Image: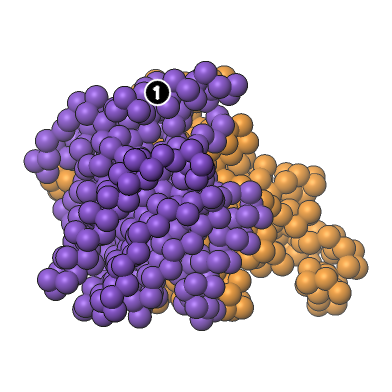
Amino acid sequence: MSRRSLPAILCLALLPCAWGAAPPPLAGPPPIAIAIHGGAGVVEPSKMTPDQEASYRSGLAAALDAGYAILERGGSSLDAVTTAVRMMEDDPQFNAGRGAVLDQDGDAELDAAIMDGQGPKAGAVAAVRHVKNPIDLARMVMEHSPHVLMIGDGAEEFALEQGVILVPRGYFRTPRRIAELEEARQLHNARGGTPGSGTVGAVALDRAGNLAAATSTGGLTNKHRGRVGDSPIIGAGTYANNQSCAVSGTGDGEYFIRQVLAYDICAQVAYKKVPLSQAVYEEIHTKLQAAGGEGGVIAIDPSGQIVMDFNSIGMFRGARDEHGRREIAMYRDR
Amino acid sequence: MHAIAIHGGAGAAPRASLSAEREARYRAGLAAALDAGYAILEQGGTSLDAVTLAVRMLEDDPMFNAGHGAALTREGAAELDAAIMDGRNMRAGAVASVRHVKNPVQLARHVMEKSRHVLLVGPGAEEFALEEGLALVPNSYFRTTERIEQLAFEQRGEHVSDIVPPTRGTVGAVARDAAGNLAAATSTGGMTNKRPGRVGDSPIIGAGTYAKNGVCAVSATGHGEYFIRAVAAHHVCAAVEYRNLALEEAVRELLHEILRKLGGDGGLIAVDQAGRLVMDFSTEGMFRGARDSNGRRDIAIY
């Protein structure tokens, strides 16, 4: 029996009445599943208005359902995570694409990465300032160049060669982020930066059994120009491998880089043979906590098991699979 | 027990095409960096200082593809990447795509020690260098006649931009000091005729550079894109930590099984907590050197 048919059979036996989704056929293809996050730097519960909360939830739901719809039609996990992340990039509430936080110069400087668990293959861009959807450019780096990481002006030159239309820097700036930058400038010196508010990411498993992960961010408010966090670093903020797991992270990027956090989760799954939830727990609540870092991850393994965990106040997140799970949450309990 | 290993890049010129005179120059450059790094360890200095100095000396030596004498982009400019990691506290610093920093490994160390960040890139990294009081140099400082000729040769070839060119002389060092601390550093100009903005594995913590006390320290060289996908340096240490593989076996599996299967070649140097040095490669050669307090002192190319 293949490793993947076991959960399928268990599902048939234990969850025959799961709503909305047909149970997978006996010894059939792997179950589809997707998880997304909109960042671990969430607003404190007491400061979140009902309107804001509803708005965040609908943004997350739209991205989650769009990604899931792709999987449901037999599409690839790569397409699902690309679409989910692109939608959150376009949603100004989240810190990626339009509405990304602003750096010390008042500009958005964007990073993104995507990884295909089959291969594995990867693409990433960092410090781009005129690319509407950095996740699409990261995917072009993966699919249309022999490289993995391209940064700054060179990445934008590549975008133009690929026929991507660049946008002016003003496209990314929103009144909310301008106000946040002003506030940060008064609180911190130029070398500071307020902790992240809302990197976005997605992980998915498709019908063919392929895992994928994608992450996109504007980084830190008032960040030093040229500062790159974990999101575009393969192994730190983004990792996928069909043999072990797919992970997208959000949080204190520097800690994620030092810990090679995303890959370390998958290495624990592959080498220590621990369940994904245990590997994530160890990574976030033991290692990251001990190092003094905050953040969270979404992760998925080849059986479609989704883990979403964080040591911050909350993490905007959503998960959906064909066993009927569909949840959107922000804090520990809601 | 203290030990240091250095590399000057994998994918050395075929044995037949390396003249005796050039071979002697490579060996002299490697020996100088190795012995300078070792001297720091011998005087009771830190592994961090030893790898910084060894890499700086290789950056300053025009024979190697890092700092002065770095490979040139398709536009004829040097674009430099470097990283350093301190296994004691797992702090790390890295810079990518800098064009005016004489010793990128030194700037990487400033990022680690003087900023709250790990990775700074491009003009923002150079702004940070100025804030730190490091003098910038013109890009012409890095360009040597030999690299200009190599670029022209490359550009006369069939492919102009996206092939894997022969120049892969990244430099790096790993060390264990008497206090048991591990450190790793790597610096490179990347591939000859590379597209501006392309970043390889060297400045990526976990890919080209990694150090963790009690486990291992690694500096890699080779086809960077494959090393990034394989999260190569951390992979070696994860195999040691989670599977209790001997360092040598972990390195062998990465280079000769995992990377080979992916289609990438290269090499790496590594040191474990016991001070055991491993230097291995899947290319024809790798410029390298190793020295430890048990009396070992090797310089080798093939």
Residue B93's place in the image compared with A125, above or below, is below
Q: Amino acid at mark 1?
A: Glu
Q: Nearer the viewer, residue A276 or B229?
A: B229
Subunit of mark 1?
B
Residue under label 1, please give it: B149
Residue A303's place in the image compared with B151, above or below, is below
Report if residue A276 is visible in the image.
Answer: no
Q: Quadrant of the N terminus of chain B?
A: bottom left
The colour applied to the residues of chain B in this rendering is purple
Give the secondary structure at mark 1.
helix
Residue B253's place in the image compared with B134, above or below, is below
Report if residue A275 is visible in the image.
Answer: yes
Residue A39's place in the image compared with B198, above or below, is below
Residue at the image position 48 percent from the left and 38 percent from the top: B17
The colour applied to the residues of chain A in this rendering is orange
Residue at the image position 46 percent from the left and 45 percent from the top: B12
Q: Residue furthest right?
A: A26
Residue at the image position 51 percent from the left and 66 percent from the top: B251
Q: How is the image coloured?
A: by chain
Percent across and percent down for residue B151 are: 43, 25
The quadrant where residue B89 appears: bottom left
Percent across and percent down for residue B254 are: 56, 63
Residue at the image position 54 percent from the left and 36 percent from the top: B164
Residue A265 relative to residue A111: left or right: right
